[in-house]
Image (cartoon, helix red, strand yellow):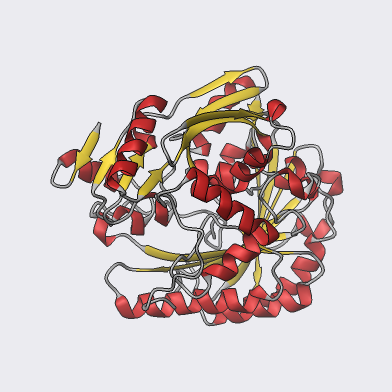
Amino acid sequence: MELHQGETAYESALAAVFNGDAAAAHPASIAQPRDEQEVAAFVRQACAQKRPLRVRSGGHSRFCSGDGAQMLDLAAHLRGVTVSGDLVTVQGGCGVGAVLQALAPHNRMVPVGTHATPGFGLLTMGGIGHLSRRFGLTLDCVVAMRGVRANGDRFEIRAEEADGSEVWRRLRGAAPFLAVITEATLRTYPRRPLHGIRQLNALPSLVDALHCAERLPRQIACSFVLGVPPDQEQAQLMRYVVLQEGDEALLPAFLREGLECWHDHVAGQEWLPDFNLPDRNGVLPPEPSVEPDRFRRLRSWIYTVSVPSGLSHALAPRLEEAMRKAPNRLCRIDLQHIGGAVADQPMASSLYRGRHAEWSIVISGFWSAGDALHQQAVCRWADEAFDALESLACHVYLVERHPGTIRYQRELELAYGSELPQLRQMKKQWDPNHLLPSLDGSAISPFAG
C-alpha cells in the first residue's frame, strides 16, 4: 500500500510517529509494505525515482520521515514476534516493549533500552538499558538478520555463517546507513524479577554519586537523570538503580535509604517505572496526551556521548554547568550506566565502538513547535553541552545525529573511528544512489550551528 498527501491514511500514518520533527515532515509518499517482497519493490521504486528513503520502525528518530522522501512505514504491518525456545524472531516494525510482552509468558527476555517504544534503530545501533551491565547490548543478542539493501537486493545473514564477515560486523552498528532491516532473530535470557530503587538528590552530589556508581559490581546498574522534577523549580539528580531480586546483599547501604527513596519490585524489565523524573512523593505523573496536531508537537535536538570511567571530577562539573544553563525545564541529561558485560564482547565483533565506556550520556533539548527563538536557544545549549563533553568522550552513539552541521564529521569519527573509510566504501556498494541517511560529514548547511 502506498499513501500520498491529501489522503486521510497519509495523515494518520504521520500522526502515529512519536518524534515531533518526523511527524511534521512532508514525505512524497508513505509505503506500508506487508512483507519483505513488498519492501524490496518499494526500495527499487525509490532507486528508480532517486528519491530519499526513510524507514519508520519505532518512530523515535528524526530520520524516520523527511520532506520529499519515500517513507517506508514498517510499523503498519511488519510487527510480528515469534518465540522459539531461547530465540525470538522480530519483524522490523515492532517496538522493543512489544518484544518483552511477547516473551514474558515464556519467562524469557532480551536486554533493551530504558523505554518501551523504540524499534529497530535501537536494536541495530546498540541498545543500552538497565540490564546492559549484566547481559550486554541488545545488538549483542542478534544472531540473524534479513533485509533489503538500498539497491533493492534482498539478503539474509546469520552469525554462525558470518565468522569474520565484514558485512555482519557493519550491519550491527551501522545498518540504518546501509539497508532496510526487515527481520532479526535474537538470543534471549531467562526472565527474572527485578528490584528498582529511585532516589532524588541535590545536583551538587553528582561527583560523589558517579564515583560510587563506578565501583559497583556488574550485577547493579546505577543510572541518573539530571533535570527539573514536575513539582519543583530547580534541577535535581535522580539516581535509578536496577538489580535482580536476590542480589540485594551487593547493595551499599546508601543506595537503599534516603528521605526521597522509592523501591519497586517488578516481575520483569517491562514493568520498571519509566526512566523519568518523579514528583517529590515518587509518583510519576501521567504521560501527557499526544498532541493530535502533528505540526504542534515538541521538537528535539539530542546528542548521545559515551565517556569512560575515572573521569567523575572532570565530568560532573561540566554536566552541572550544562543543567544550570538549560533554557527551559524540559531539557534534561541522562547518564545510562554501561560497562560490565558490554565490555566483554571484543571491539571487533560489531561496529558499536563504545564498549570501553562507563556512561552513555544523553543530552536532550526540547522546544515547542513554531518557537524559533526557543529553538535557537535549545539547539545552542545542546551543542555547547556536546562540545564540553567531547574531550572526555570515547564514542558517540549515533541513534541521534546531526547531518549538515559543523559537528557531524566529529560525531562520525567518534562513532566509527578508523572503521569510517571502510564503512563509507561499503555504503557506496549497498547504497549507490545515496537514498539512506548520509555518512558524509563535509556537507555543511549554511544554516547549521
From the viewer's perspective, is 69 left or right of 349? Answer: left
Residue name at image x 66 percent, y 17 percent = 85
Establish if 87 lies above or below 254.
Answer: above
**Residue 307 falls in image quadrant:** bottom right
Residue 95 position in % (x across, y down): 48, 38
Residue 321 position in % (x across, y down): 61, 82
Residue 384 position in % (x across, y down): 54, 79
Establish if 306 lies above or below 422.
Answer: below
Of the pair 441 and 89, the residue shown nearer to us: 441
Residue 414 position in % (x across, y down): 65, 65
Residue 216 shows in the view: yes
Query: Which quarter of the image is occupied by the C terminus?
Result: bottom left
Residue at the far left: name it: 6
Residue at the far top: name it: 85
Residue 228 shows in the view: no
Residue name at image x 39 percent, y 36 percent = 74
Of the pair 345 and 298, the residue shown nearer to us: 345
Query: Which quarter of the image is occupied by the N terminus?
Result: top left
The tally of labels here is: 0
From the viewer's perspective, is 82 left or right of 25? Answer: right
**Residue 389 falls in image quadrant:** bottom right
From the viewer's perspective, is 339 left or right of 373? Answer: right
